[in-house]
Image (cartoon, coloured by chain):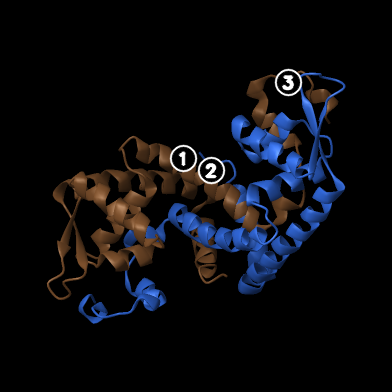
Chain colours: A brown, B blue
Amino acid sequence: MRTSHRHRSEGDTDRIQAEISLGPLAGYVGFMLRRIQTTVFSDFIASLGELDLRPAQYSLLEVIDANPGLRQSDAAAALGIQKANFVALVNELERRALVQRRRSTADRRSYSLHLQARGRRLLEAARDRHDAQESRLRALLGAQDRDRLLALLNRLADVS
Amino acid sequence: MRTSHRHRSEGDTDRIQAEISLGPLAGYVGFMLRRIQTTVFSDFIASLGELDLRPAQYSLLEVIDANPGLRQSDAAAALGIQKANFVALVNELERRALVQRRRSTADRRSYSLHLQARGRRLLEAARDRHDAQESRLRALLGAQDRDRLLALLNRLADVS
């Protein structure tokens, strides 16, 4: 295998990848989840990047839209983001006038999160990109297998 | 929903996560792949950490084991790691006497990668952790659905 590769050009990565064995790695759900997720995610990062939005920012806009006025700490927990990182995330969205943080009237120590009009427009544009990617995944798998994959992934939510 | 949360303690994250809606996000394969992969990966990172090994290092040991003497550039391509990062990765494994880099006799500009005895022992210990995680995933899904998930993931390898 190695000798035939000796003078290969840089552009031949697809062929290289097909020829080099991943060994037992290819048989692990854990490894393949990582590998496939990385590919799918890169594609999504690129399409969101055109909107100057990162995936974590987009997810937060979605969660605020689904739970208007939710507590900042609840949003962080729902998205599995650590408190310090989450505060920086909200700060940036607030600075860009996408999200508004209001002190809770019920509990003065906490903040509730709200979408601004500008945030809603950006969310809609980002969701279009997410939808477009999902359509590509559905086309690749077929609708039935796509639903099956989603169901299987959901069953792994309790792992660890 | 919000009012019942007002005086909740910090330890209640499980309950919080169940109550806050992810909105449309939960219906996207892209988002759920990311979410589940993050959980599964964290668990694996922790178990490898006990061996002072990161997932990328473990993957490289597996690929060298499956393709002894492979070219450094081919290993980088197979794992989808950028050249600069890959060189740093190999440097560290070489410094720890896990991997040996040898100048190729056929092409003096390239290096071939080999496991050292110490690298093989560490690989075996790491693979045991990977196997243990895979067993937990299999137990959670059942053997048949685990195989189905792996097959579905493989079909997404060509996305983008």
The answer to which of marks 3 and 2 sits earlier in the sequence is 3
The number of numbered discs placed on residues in the rendered structure image is 3
Specify whether residue A22 is in view.
Answer: no
Residue at point 42%, 56% (across, down): B28
Pinpoint residue B152: horizontal percent, then vertical percent.
60, 55
Residue bearing mark 3? A8
Q: Please tell me the numbered disc located at residue A43.
A: 1
User: First in sequence: mark 3 or mark 1?
Assistant: 3
Give SS at disc 3: loop
Residue A62 visible? The answer is: yes
Where is the C terminus of chain A found, in terms of image quarters?
Answer: bottom right
Could you say which is closer to the camera, residue A155 or residue B129? B129
Tag 2 subunit: A
Amino acid type of the residue that numbered disc 3 sits on in the rendered structure: Arg
Q: Residues within 10 Å of mark 3 (few under 14, many from 20)?
A: few
Rendered image: mark on residue A39: 2
Indicate the amino acid at tag 2. Answer: Thr
Which percent across, then down, holds residue B134?
68, 64
Front residue of this view, candidates A67 and B53: B53
Mark 2 element type? helix
- What's the distance in space between the residues labelled 3 and 1, CA to CA? 27 Å
Pointers 1 and 2 in contact (C-beta within 8 Å)? yes
| Rendering coords of residue A48 (x, y %) | 36, 41
Question: On the rendered structure, is A154 left or right of B140?
Answer: left
Question: Is disc 3 in contact with disc 1, using a CB cutoff of under 8 Å?
Answer: no
Q: Residue at x 81, y 40 (%)?
A: B67
Q: Amino acid at mark 1?
A: Asp
The quadrant where residue B147 appears: bottom right
Question: Which chain hosts label 1?
Answer: A
